[in-house]
């Protein structure tokens, strides 16, 4: 059995994104969840599956939304790859006949509730790094990921300006989005002048830390057709784990992420080719991670990500518009659920000024922890 | 290293699998796990050999010689304990034994950093019972 076209995204909901919500993570997630359920044209009592992210549990949704008969709950702990992996999990549960409408919320006080860089130490999936690298001063994701980017630069001649093109293009898209934290334009010179965090990552190569919540509803494909909005059908979805998944230092090929294993599975399941993809929302915790995924997904060859982005390919109007909402770099860090929400808007034709004309098929990715990957290919239903 | 005041950096919490590694550093030796089943060397310390699934290990001393695989130069203090060290270079190194390590690299100007640069391991006792490795320029093999 394949998961192809067994599920569809039927609802998306987002709170306002900010640096200080002044509210609990649970209340943020409940607001986004209600919006997603309403967007789908469902009632909270229709929800029979929940995949919570972190800090909250399925019971919180049963209690607050008043869910009478939750039949399925699970967690997909892949860091930033969790959201798209949760779509795979939801579609699998639906295809197995366990449930019909799965709510997937994420939410965080990522800016006001404690810095993300400091929280990493406590995460169990970072245990080896915590014992063997953090005491030596390699503490935050920026430092742990930077050697991947540096090696790519040394092997392939990739430049900081090419990474900067990703930041600049993403910021330009955020300027078109009414719910983006960053609202000032950015030039390549601004990027080059931003302070060095951990070479080669400058401040503007790094994503935001944000407060807010984003939620989606994944429904059984046959039930999705009669709901309020046109369904966005999941054609193919997969997760992939890199070699040496807990420690980048020991990875045989430091320039290859888990998504390199997932991408062929997702494309084969979807039955589409790269040229069929009209728009891509690519997880962007750091600029380099976007470039590396574009290569690992097969949109360009390994090592050609720099020239690919420099050509303008990822800009709105380019060959493959990327992160049309402003991404984690400039809209908000919502663990990539905002990427799924944006792809749904694009495929419904609801993306406003950032709308890619005639977008019919799109792709969304997640990247998490030390290189876990997830990817979904979706179409307008 | 801070001779005065308390040590305020992150410290490791050794496990039964890794205790010999940390004890080795205290004796200024870089010890690696070697599988008793198939002879494969692995790093970082962990319970099982992924090739033959043996959980029996012996500890072998690494030469301490290697070459740079990649690096980052950190300019931001992600923890209060590293503020005085900024900027510092963290190098990923291919050891002669076929595994990698990561440590601070000292004594190499930023513009001399390159893949393949020979380095070797040194040791410093940073507090009672805790010795950490660091890297310095090494001789070409
Ligand atoms: Zn073995």
Image (cartoon, rainbow, N blue to C red):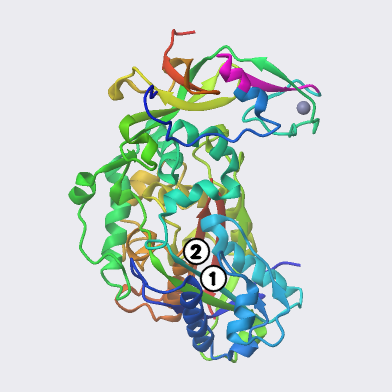
Foreground of the two, A239 or A303: A239
The answer to whether the residue labelled 2 contacts the one labelled 1, judged by CB atoms less than 8 Å apart, is yes
Q: Secondary structure at mark 2?
A: strand
- Tag 2 residue: A364
Up the image or down, B27 lies above or below A366; here it is: above
Quarter occupied by the N terminus of chain A: bottom right
Foreground of the two, A380 or A367: A367
Ligand 1 appears in which quadrant? Answer: top right
- Tag 1 residue: A378
Q: Secondary structure at mark 1?
A: strand
Q: Which residues are magenta?
A: B23-36
Identity of the residue drawn at 20% across and 62% down: A185
**How crowded is the residue under tag 2: few (<14 C-alpha within 10 Å), some, or many (20+)?**
many
Q: Is residue A195 toward the left or the right of residue A280 in the image?
A: left
Up the image or down, B86 lies above or below A210; here it is: above
Identity of the residue drawn at 28% across and 23% down: B111
Residue A363, image x, y percentages: 50, 64
Disc sitting over residue B29 in the figure:
none
Q: Is residue A154 toward the left or the right of residue A245 in the image?
A: left
Q: Is residue A188 magenta?
A: no
Q: Is residue B29 magenta?
A: yes
């Amino acid at each position: 059995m394949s998961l192809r076209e067994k599920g569809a995204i039927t609802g998306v909901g987002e709170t306002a994104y900010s640096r200080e919500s002044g509210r609990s993570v649970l209340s943020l997630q409940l607001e986004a969840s209600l919006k997603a359920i309403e967007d789908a044209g469902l009632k909270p009592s229709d929800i029979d599956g929940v995949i919570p992210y972190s800090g909250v549990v399925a019971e919180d949704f049963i209690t607050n939304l008043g869910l009478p008969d939750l039949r399925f709950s699970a967690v997909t702990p892949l860091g930033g790859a969790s959201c798209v992996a949760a779509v795979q999990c939801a579609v699998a549960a639906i295809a197995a006949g366990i449930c019909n409408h799965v709510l997937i919320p994420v939410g965080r006080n990522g800016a006001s509730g404690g810095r993300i860089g400091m929280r990493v130490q406590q995460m169990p999936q970072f245990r080896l790094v915590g014992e063997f690298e953090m005491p030596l001063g390699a503490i935050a994701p920026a430092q742990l990921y930077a050697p991947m980017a540096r090696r790519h630069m040394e092997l392939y001649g990739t430049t900081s300006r090419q990474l900067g093109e990703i930041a600049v293009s993403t910021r330009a898209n955020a300027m078109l989005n009414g719910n983006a934290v960053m609202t000032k334009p950015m030039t390549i010179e601004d990027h080059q002048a931003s302070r060095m965090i951990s070479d080669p990552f400058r401040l503007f190569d790094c994503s935001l830390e944000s407060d807010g919540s984003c939620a989606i509803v994944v429904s059984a494909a046959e039930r999705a057709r009669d709901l309020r909005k046109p369904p966005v059908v999941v054609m193919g979805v997969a997760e992939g784990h890199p070699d040496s998944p807990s420690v980048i230092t020991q990875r045989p090929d430091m320039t290859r992420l888990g998504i390199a294993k997932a991408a062929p599975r997702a494309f084969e399941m979807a039955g589409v080719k790269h040229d069929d993809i009209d728009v891509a929302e690519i997880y962007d915790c750091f600029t380099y991670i976007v470039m590396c995924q574009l290569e690992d997904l097969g949109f360009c060859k390994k090592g050609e990500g720099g020239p690919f982005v420099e050509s303008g390919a990822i800009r709105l109007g380019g060959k493959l518009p990327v992160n049309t909402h402003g991404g984690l770099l400039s809209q908000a860090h919502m663990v990539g659920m905002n990427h799924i929400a944006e792809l749904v808007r694009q495929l419904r034709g609801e993306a406003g000024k950032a709308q890619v004309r005639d977008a019919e098929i799109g792709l969304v990715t997640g990247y998490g922890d030390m290189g876990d990957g997830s990817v979904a290919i979706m179409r307008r239903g | 290293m801070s001779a005065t005041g308390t040590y305020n950096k992150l410290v490791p919490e050794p496990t039964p699998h890794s205790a010999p590694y940390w004890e080795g550093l205290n004796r200024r030796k870089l010890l690696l796990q070697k599988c008793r089943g198939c002879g494969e060397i692995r790093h970082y310390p962990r319970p099982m050999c992924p090739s033959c699934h043996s959980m029996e290990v012996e500890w072998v001393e690494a030469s301490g010689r290697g070459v740079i695989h990649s690096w980052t130069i950190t300019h931001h203090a992600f923890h209060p304990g590293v503020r005085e060290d900024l900027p510092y270079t963290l190098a990923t190194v291919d050891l002669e034994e076929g595994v990698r390590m990561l440590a601070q690299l000292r004594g190499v100007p930023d513009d001399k950093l390159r893949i393949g640069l020979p380095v070797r391991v040194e040791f410093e006792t940073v507090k009672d019972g805790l010795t950490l490795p660091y890297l310095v320029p090494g001789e070409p093999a």
